[in-house]
Image (cartoon, grey):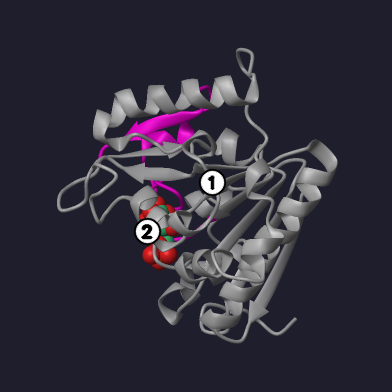
Amino acid sequence: MLVQDVIVEESPGSLARRAAALFAATAEESVLRRGRFVAALAGGSTPREAYGLLARPPLSRAVRWGKTFLFWGDERCVAADDPRSSFGAARDGFLKDVALTDAHLNRIRGELGAEAAARDYEERMARFFGLGGGEVPSFDLAFLGVGADGHTASLFPGDAALEELKRLAVPVERPPPDVDRVTLTLPVLNGARLVVFLVTGGEKADVVKGILGGETPHLPAARVKPGSGRLLWLLDRAAAAQLGEG
Ligand code: 6PG
């Protein structure tokens, strides 16, 4: 049964501290239970402060980086050095400061082009998780963001990627000035043990209210409901502003 929680933090700063602490606690529990911690990271600007905290004491010392493996929820089809690359942002923002070797970093190789990068990423997941046909990975943690339009990862409202039930990752065409992307599919996100949405800012208040109030069940972010996992919406006060008191 799906367990859904909503936590409202006072500010983007306290949300970042909560998110980083959650990452570290989930890592510890996963290593204890299964010997490793496998997380899918979100792109976008919201998680950046939390990522920065993971690279500094005390959290940098609390996480067992040698047993931590990172994937990404989505990526833009650009080289890793391009400022639009989610992997590049994470590398510059914190990965360069923690003891993670390349073997632990499972980035989406956007520079291959969307279809080839999606296939490459699917193969990487299948190998890493030892998946048979039809099986989906079980990430210990997936961080996600949400756009004001209700998109999450690179699952956009009305896009065919949203209806994909078989593939683990798919290409997503985007109109300029955006660039094509690769995204994990809903079955993969919904296979995670813990999904955490990180949402800040008043411009997200309406979409948060629609999703958490059950008014917009068709939106991509509303369709993330990890069947046997836990779903947490971590909001700052501004993003939670339209939610009722009860
Ligand atoms: C990305 C993600 C996207 C993101 C949301 C929220 O941009 O890399 O694909 O889903 O998480 O657009 O972005 P912000 O955190 O920048 O608001």
**Residue ID at (61%, 87%):** 10
Residue at 66 percent across and 81 percent down: it is 244
Q: With respect to residue 77, does 132 lie above or below? A: above
Left or right, 159 with reference to 95: left
Measured from the top left, where is residue 63 in percent x and y? Answer: 68, 56
Q: Which residue is mark 2?
A: 92
> Is there any visible trace of residue 169 in the rendered image?
yes
Range covered by the magenta-colored residues: 144-173
Residue farthest left in this picture: 176
In the rendered view, tell whether residue 71 sits above or below residue 21: above
Question: Which residue is at the front of the view, 215 or 133?
Answer: 133
**Where the N terminus falls, by quadrant?**
top right
Tell me which residue sits at (71%, 52%) in the image: 27
Q: Find numbered disc 2 in the image and state the secondary structure of the residue it sits on.
A: helix
Magenta highlight on residue 163: yes
Q: Label 2, label 1: how many angstroms apart (C-alpha)?
A: 13 Å
Q: Earlier in the sequence, mark 2 or mark 1?
A: 2
Give the residue at mark 1: 100
The spot of residue 99 in percent (x, y) is: 55, 50
Q: Amino acid at mark 2?
A: Asp
